[in-house]
Image: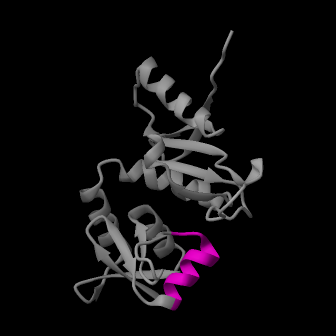
Amino acid sequence: MITGKLAESRVRIVDEEDAEEVHDEYYYGKFQDEEETVLELSLVEALHLVDRDVIEVEDSGETLSRETLYDHCIEVDDEFDQKYKVYDDLRDRGYIVKSGFKFGAHFRVYPEGVNPYKEGPKSQREHTQWVVHAVPEDYTLSFQEMSRAVRLAHNIRATMLWGIVDSEGGVTYYEVERATP
């Protein structure tokens, strides 16, 4: 079992071989040092890997239960519940999911089989396919917010999706496209 250490809003895998396995085999996390030995996972990535029995998470030398880790995640991030449900759904469908923070959304999503770390020229299939923002079913947004999100996704040749999480925990995706006259 791979061990990660809780660091407030991240989980770090410090064993070099374990970090490499999680990163290179599963496309989770981001290396935080030049030597690529310390892998940082977001909380959604860490909980997803805990749920798949790939890692366990420790805090102060004690292994956290899934429930304790989940409670910590909810405390740290008000949007965690809907973000996790969308992340989990996308991963279960076989997609590669990375942070969409710099695009103003929760996630950027790649098709199965794509290496999101590829450097150099990429084919259309290797680019981000979707930019996804997770929201609860009672969420309201302005036309300006919707327009900004669609424009940002369009700028990177991606499609903007809203992952709507209903009260039963189901996820429905809505695509919004930019239309020009």
- Residue 110 in the magenta stretch? The answer is no
Q: Nearer the viewer, residue 172 or 110?
A: 110
Q: Position of residue 89 (x, y in %)?
A: 58, 54
54 versus 176 height, above or below: below
Whether residue 1 is visible, yes or no, is no
Residue 24 included in the magenta stretch of the image: yes
Q: Position of residue 49 (x, y in %)?
A: 50, 73
Q: Quadrant of residue 92?
A: bottom right
Point out the stretch of residues depicted in magenta. 17-28
147 up-or-down from 17: above or below: above
Write the residue at 37% across / 53% down: 80
Q: Is residue 82 left or right of residue 72?
A: right
What is the residue that sits farthest to the top in this orientation? Answer: 181
**Which of 66 and 94 lies nearest the eye of the viewer?**
94
Tell me where residue 163 appears, x and y as whole percent.
Answer: 53, 41
> In the image, residue 13 lies at what x, y percent?
41, 81
> Please, what is the dominant secondary structure of the magenta stretch?
helix
One can see residue 81 in this view: yes
Q: Quadrant of residue 65?
A: bottom left
